[in-house]
Amino acid sequence: VLGSSATGVDGGAPWPSFRHDPKNRGTSAYAPSSCTIRRNLTPFRLETSLLPGATPGQILLSGVVAHVGGGATPDECRFLSLKNDSGQLIELCVQLPAGYEIPVVPGESIVLEYSAIGSAEGGLYERYVIWDKSGALRFFYWSGDLPYYDPATCAHDCPKLAFSKSSCPTEELSCGLIVHPALELSIPGGCNETTVVAPGEIRTFENLTDLCPPFRARVMVARTRKYQTMLCEDVPDTYAQLAIIVNQSVSQCNCSDNGDCRSNEICDTEARRCVPNRCLEGVNCGPTTTCNPYNGNCEALPEPQMACDTSANCLPGWVCNPQWRSILGHGLCQKNPCTLMDCNGGCSGLSGCIGACLSNCDCKKPGNVDGVCDVESRSCID
C-alpha cells in the first residue's frame, strides 16, 4: 500500500513530516533551524462562549457536538457548538492557518477542558484540550508562559512540551535580549516519540510502522519567545503559542497530505479532500504491480516515469499522484482520467467523479452549518 505525502496547502513545496522510525526511537527525528524561521502563523486564535467572566481556573465539561460549520471566508472562524450535560450550548470560534479546525463531528461525545490564569496576552496562559469519550486526544491549544504548563494537571493525557536549546543569535527588546526557540513535543498516541517544531512551522506527525497503532496529527507553532536577559519586572520570561490537531479519527475538511485525514483515508491533492483508501479493502497485488489507493487497482509504474511534487510538475493532461512517495521518495505523474470521463459534479484526476460531495463541509445547511456526506455515493444526506 502506498504511503503518505507532505505537500503544502498552497500546492507548493511539501511540508516537512515526522514519521516514526524505530531506529531513531527516543530521539528527535528533526531539528529545524529556528534561526531561519521568523514568520508568525496567522490567523491563530481561539475564543469561546464558555462561562464568560468566570473566575480563572480550570473548567471540565462533557457533552455532545451539536454543530460544526462557518469559515466561508478566511476572515471568518470555524465554529464548534457543544451541548453539555446540563443542556447549555457552548460555542468555540477557531481560526487556524490554512483553515484547520478541531476534528470532531456532530453527534459525537467529547470532553472539553478550559484552563486559564489571567490573560494569555498578559503573559499567563490559556489552555484548551478536547478528548473523545475514550480519553484519546483530539485537540490541544496553548497560549502563554510555558513554565505554567503542566501536563499532569490535564483530565486525560496531554502532550509534553519544552523549549529546545537554542544557539540562535539574540535579539534586543526593551526588556532585554530574546531568542525564538523551537519546541520539543511528545504527543499522546504518537509512540512516545519526540519531534522538534520551530516557530512559524506546521509539521505532520505520523506513525507508519507496526510497532505502534496508526497515528496522524498536525503540529503548528505560531510563535515563541524566551528572554535571555530580563530588565522588567512585569513581563514573563517566556511565551509560546501552538496547536496540535489529531486527525486519526476525523478528517479535516481540506487536506494537503495524508496527515490531514483519518487512518483509513488518504488526501486527494487535486480535490483537496480526504477520500477512502481503496487499498485497505482486501486488495492483493502481484510482484510487478502496486495498489493505487485512489481506485484500488493494481498498477505498474506509470510510463514515462516523471517525478513530481505537484501536478504543476507534470505535462498537460497528467496529474501528480503523491502516494508513490512512500516507495520512491517522490510522487509520479500519471494520465488524468477526467479527460475520458463524463462526470456530473466535477472530476478529480486522482479520485475520478466527485459527485455532490467528498466531505461534510461540502454539504451546507442553513446557518452555514456542515451537513453529512455519504463518501461512498458521494452525495449529501438530508
Image (cartoon, rainbow, N blue to C red):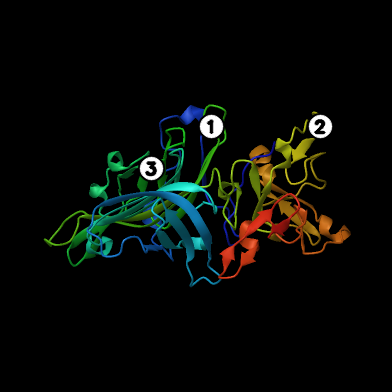
- Give residue 232's quadrant in the image: bottom left
Q: Earlier in the sequence, mark 1 or mark 2?
A: 1
Give the alpha-carbon distance from disc 1 to disc 2, as whole Å.
29 Å
Front one among 56 and 29 = 56
Q: Which residue is mark 1?
A: 213
**Amino acid type assigned to the residue bearing label 2 in the image:** Thr
Q: Residue at x 59, y 45 (%)?
A: 262
Q: Seen in the image, is 139 located left or right of residue 345?
A: left
**Amino acid type assigned to the residue bearing label 1 in the image:** Pro
Residue 273: give x, y in percent of width and height: 65, 55
Res. 185 mark: 3
- Give residue 82's quadrant in the image: bottom left
**Amino acid type assigned to the residue bearing label 3 in the image:** Leu
Say which quadrant the N terminus sits in.
top right
Residue 341 shows in the view: yes
Q: Secondary structure at mark 2?
A: loop
